[in-house]
Image (cartoon, helix red, strand yellow):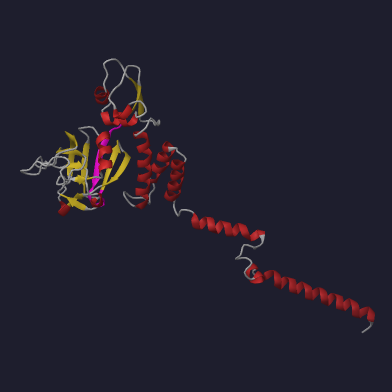
């Protein structure tokens, strides 16, 4: 072959070989070309967004309820109880969330924590009214005016009423939570739901009667709301403080109403000295709560509030 044919031929052949090699190389996956480089974080920049997106998708909640719960938790952590309550309440409306399932309960706990802030401080919320004390007023009179309790007024106005004092004076401005209170006890879930109208205000775990002794029906909170109650089983009177007294620190008596048989008397909601019994069937038929919970409920709910006990 003449030299002026030979060199151009070699040049063309080299171009073909190099092009084929590059084509094969470019089709080999990045991880195969670099060994462990991709695993150690040395992947090319164009591949990193895909890896980050996959990690984000793995960490993200699977449904809208989960996203709402995360948002509500962030609001509560940022000391925005009103926003936390509003977001958490949206969880109850999700079609895949059901009463007292895991996500419902998580949302209820957030709502409960937010409302506890409103209950125990002067933090503003739409349900609170500002009331200026007038001459002749007392906490008892103001509580009756707003269908609340002296205990609730004291809780919401701790900064003004020293050591649960009942001392007030004209011109003092009090914050009053205006609730429309009722209670629902769900026996099979060992749950007490404190409702403000149609909205959940707070969720409490409870114990119920052993051997299905807690009756189903509709009741009202009676006038026998007692601090440090004595226990009066048939033929006995066991004073508060006696180790045999099982009622804890508070008693809210239940009076049958509506279609509930009038013979279902003697039941109530009370505290306990046995916190490990909460979440079980352990009582003689009453609804048991932790002492701190029943003390709070006692202060929130006035006499006459409806209590509905149901199985599920």
Residue 158 in which image quadrant = top left
Viewer-proximal residue among 151 and 178: 151
Say above or below: 36 vs 254.
Answer: below
Residue shown at 58%/60% (left/top)? Answer: 51
Q: Which residues are magenta?
A: 177-190
Say above or below: 92 vs 177.
Answer: below
In the picture provided, is 55 more to the left or to the right than 29?
A: left
Q: Classify the position of the N terminus by image quarter.
A: bottom right
Residue 119 seen: yes
Residue 55 in which image quadrant = bottom right
| Residue 123: % across, % down | 40, 31
Q: Is residue 13 magenta?
A: no
Residue shown at 17%/53% (left/top)? Answer: 210
Q: How many marks?
A: 0
| Residue 184: % across, % down | 25, 42
Residue 82 in which image quadrant = top left
Q: Is residue 188 magenta?
A: yes
């Amino acid at each position: 072959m003449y030299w002026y044919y030979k060199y151009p031929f070699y040049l063309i052949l080299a171009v073909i070989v190099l092009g084929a090699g590059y084509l094969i190389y470019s089709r080999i996956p990045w991880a195969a070309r670099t060994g462990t480089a991709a695993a150690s974080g040395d992947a090319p920049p164009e591949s990193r967004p895909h890896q980050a997106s996959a990690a984000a998708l793995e960490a993200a909640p699977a449904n809208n309820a989960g996203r709402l719960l995360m948002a509500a938790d962030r609001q509560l952590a940022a000391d925005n109880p009103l926003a936390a309550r509003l977001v958490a309440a949206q969880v109850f409306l999700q079609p895949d969330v059901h009463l007292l399932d895991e996500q419902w309960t998580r949302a209820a706990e957030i709502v409960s924590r937010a409302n506890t802030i409103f209950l125990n401080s002067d933090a503003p919320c739409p349900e609170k009214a500002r009331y200026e004390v007038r001459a002749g007023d007392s906490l008892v009179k103001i509580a009756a005016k707003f269908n609340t309790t002296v205990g609730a007024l004291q809780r919401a106005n701790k900064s003004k009423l020293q050591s649960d004092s009942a001392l007030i004076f004209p011109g003092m401005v009090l914050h009053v939570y205006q609730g429309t209170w009722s209670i629902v006890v769900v026996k099979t879930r060992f749950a007490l739901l404190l409702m403000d109208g149609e909205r959940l205000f707070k969720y409490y775990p409870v114990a119920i009667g052993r051997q299905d002794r807690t009756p189903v029906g509709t009741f009202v909170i009676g006038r026998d709301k007692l601090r440090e109650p004595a226990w009066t089983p048939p033929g006995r009177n066991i004073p508060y403080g006696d180790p045999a007294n099982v009622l804890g620190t508070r008693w809210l008596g239940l009076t049958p109403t509506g279609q509930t048989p009038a013979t279902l008397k003697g039941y109530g909601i009370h505290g306990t000295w046995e916190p490990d019994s909460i979440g079980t069937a352990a009582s003689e038929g009453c609804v048991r709560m932790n002492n701190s919970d029943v003390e709070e409920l006692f202060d929130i709910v006035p006499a006459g509030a409806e209590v509905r006990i149901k199985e599920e």
